[in-house]
Image (cartoon, rainbow, N blue to C red):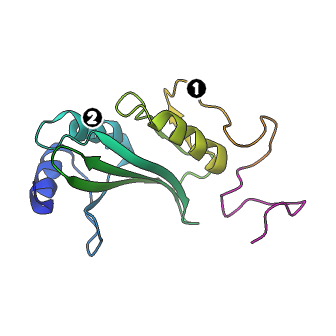
Amino acid sequence: MTNDQLKEKISEWVSGIEFPENKQYLEVLVPANSLKKLAELLHNTPETDFDYLISLSGVDYVSHLAVVYHLESTSHKHFLVMKVKTEDRENPNFDTVNEIWRTAEWYEREVFDMFGIKFNNHPDLRRLLMDDDWVGFPLRKDYKDEIKMIER
């Protein structure tokens, strides 16, 4: 399936999406309330068959927080970058994709630990790298490092 065919198929499934241009891989910006629906369709539809979650990362763009999903269909050999964002820095949350791609469980824990982004219905959302009593989220741009453990 070509990128244009993927765009057409995704546009049929979900409204309110955007396709930023001039990217190395096809990229789709999905509204937060459609994230899980699109992920399930991308994974479960034989024409797309995105069976491999390569990575899931948090990003702090200052104006908003985002989660970036790099997906591959190992059977069709196509790639997709799916992004979701929120301006809510006080209570950022998205639906988990753990039931779709099992590797998301650990990736989502890392994003929660480093950025404070919560994943609704995650089976074990707790700190992964930092101590349980750690205050703050070290990879956020508004993080205050009072003891200078992190050099910028």
Determine whether 18 is above or below 74 in the image. Answer: below
- Going 49% across and 26% down the picture, which residue do you hit? 121
Q: Quadrant of residue 1?
A: bottom left
- Going 75% across and 49% down the picture, which residue do you hit? 136
- Going 19% across and 52% down the picture, which residue do you hit? 77
Q: Which residues are magenta?
A: 137-152
Q: Nearer the viewer, residue 8 or 17?
A: 8
Residue 31 is labelled as none
Q: Which residue is mark 2?
A: 40
Q: Is residue 28 magenta?
A: no
- Going 34% across and 36% down the picture, which residue do you hit? 36
Q: Nearer the viewer, residue 81 or 116?
A: 81
Q: Is residue 142 left or right of 31 when viewed as pictured? A: right
Q: Position of residue 84 (x, y in %)?
A: 40, 52
Q: Secondary structure at mark 2?
A: helix
Q: Please tell me how crowded label 2 is: few (under 14), some (14-19), or many (20+) other residues with Cα within 10 Å.
A: some
Mark closest to the chain's N terminus, 2 or 1: 2
Q: Nearer the viewer, residue 150 or 21?
A: 150
Q: Position of residue 141 (x, y in %)?
A: 67, 64
Q: Position of residue 108 (x, y in %)?
A: 52, 40
Residue 124 is labelled as 1
Q: Please tell me how crowded label 1 is: few (under 14), some (14-19), or many (20+) other residues with Cα within 10 Å.
A: few
Screen quadrant of the C terminus: bottom right
